[in-house]
Image (tube, rainbow, N blue to C red):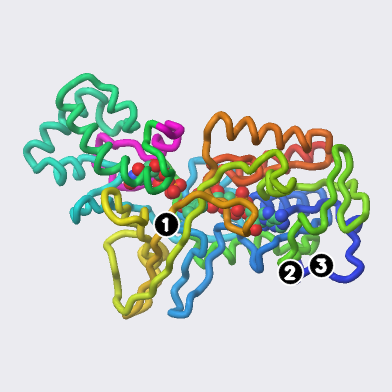
Amino acid sequence: MSIESGLPAGFNPNAYDAIIVGAGFAGAVCARRLAEAVNYKVCVLERRDHIAGNAYDYYDEAGILVHKYGPHIYHTTDDRVDTFLSRFTDWTPYQHKVLANVHGTLMPVPFNHASLKLAFGDEEGERLYQKLVGTFGQDKKVPIMELRKKNDPDLERVADYVYENVFLHYTMKQWGKTPDQIDPAVMGRVPVFVGNDDRYFPQAPHQGMPAESYTKLFERMLGHDLIDVFLDVDARDVFDITDTKLSVCGKSYGGEVIYTGALDELFDFDLGALPYRTVDMVFETLDEDQFQPVGTVNYTVSENFTRITEFKNMTGQVVPGKTTIMREYSRTYLPGVGETPYYVINEPENLELYRRYRDRVAGLLNFHVVGRLAEYRYYDMDGVTASALDLSDELISQH
Ligand code: FAD
Ligand code: UDP
């Protein structure tokens, strides 16, 4: 592999069997699979000055490994994804735990047995818990929007408490909307848990942090003789797209193109901008060993940020006397001014606009889209990896 900044003079796109835009999970997985399975010579164009996409991590000035674009916890139920990614890293065992700060009391999220007792007191919490067990069964996940539909005074009391103290304000901060105004699948990511498990991803048999770093994982995944990575190159500056033809650096290109960026941006938003939320991430290094008891604390009723992550609590890194935390401030993404679109907004009219952009590239048979931005989907890393494995399998089978 080579990694260079910028394209060399006389760059010839036709020296490559595939050109991949983006060096995140979507792009890097495809690059590796195509290089390895069918000996494709692959060019990866990445406009940032680093690989690893939004999973990029680095050591800050205090020597603490931090995630530049928000806390990333690897978790998956997909054996195929785990087998593939585990070729490029060992995993440090880590089970993510989140606490909600509710008026100063820290209670587990997903809201569980212990949270009920913290919210309602031991005796009443236990009584309500038994009611939940009787209604839904032990160790069951219940989306808050489902719990709210139950017509029973005790369950209504629990639902009202959780809705008000865990979901409403956090969701308003994160999305600018109330929980019933957004896609139920988004709220369903964090159900109420009728049980004692206090892990954020209890369902995931594979969970952890890369033993060294995400960036190292990517260095290894992209570390193949047939892969060249060019950083600081924006595909929009070198691509020229018509309905049926794609040129790169002024030369007609017939190899495979895999695009992992936002589609509206590629077309200068000419059908309108796809709505996203973005997040301002504010880092702070403190002169103390530990700031909070777990990886992430969600501020579900107070503050104007959504959550604080303390990286040492996730990576297990030991740095005496120093710790780095990060606050996340969510807001509307402004298109076209260089901001990072982080969260798709899963609403019918946005998906319809997305479909119209997809139609724009339908006639380009060698142009493939994959990834969180390009597919306009609320994907975790494992979902993106699975989608990239599917796409590369398809291209490999057509070879
Ligand atoms: P990206 O990582 O965004 O990569 C796309 C790359 O393409 C970027 O590097 C971009 O610079 C590049 N690019 C775009 N357009 C162009 C262009 N025109 N020219 C050149 N390059 C271009 N997932 C989990 O599994 N666990 C978590 O804990 C988790 N936490 C998250 C926290 C936050 C705050 C966010 C926003 C996401 C989180 N995710 C998490 C999701 C995870 O980040 C994504 O699923 C994954 O990184 C998406 O990979 P990707 O390759 O599709 O996109
Ligand atoms: N959510 C909430 N309170 C919480 C945790 C989550 O209201 O304490 C809601 C919120 O709307 C959030 C969604 O559930 O956007 C999904 O949460 P998740 O932690 O999966 O979001 P991500 O880590 O992807 O930002």
Q: Which residue is disc 3 drawn over?
A: 7
Percent x, y of residue 273: 63, 43
Label 3 close to label 1 by CB (< 8 Å): no
Q: Is residue 346 above or below residue 229?
A: above
Residue 79 falls in image quadrant? top right
Q: Residue furthest top?
A: 151
Q: Which residue is disc 2 drawn over?
A: 3
**Picture residue at 63% right of the left edge, 30% below the top:** 352
Q: Quadrant of the C terminus?
A: top right
Q: Which residue is disc 1 drawn over?
A: 329
Percent x, y of residue 111: 27, 41
> Can residue 373 be seen in the rendering of this structure?
yes
The kind of secondary structure the magenta stretch mainly shows is: loop
Residue range in magenta is 181-201
How busy is the neighbourhood of tag 3: few (under 14 within 10 Å), some, or many (20 plus)?
some
**Amino acid on which the number 2 mark rests in the picture:** Ile
Q: Which circle's residue, 3 or 1, is located before the other in the chain?
A: 3
Nearer the camera: disc 3 or disc 1? 1
* Distance between the alpha carbons at the discs numbered 3 and 1: 35 Å
Residue 47 falls in image quadrant? bottom right
How busy is the neighbourhood of tag 2: few (under 14 within 10 Å), some, or many (20 plus)?
some
**Picture residue at 38% right of the left edge, 67% below the top:** 325
* Distance between the alpha carbons at the discs numbered 2 and 3: 10 Å
Numbered badge on residue 218: none
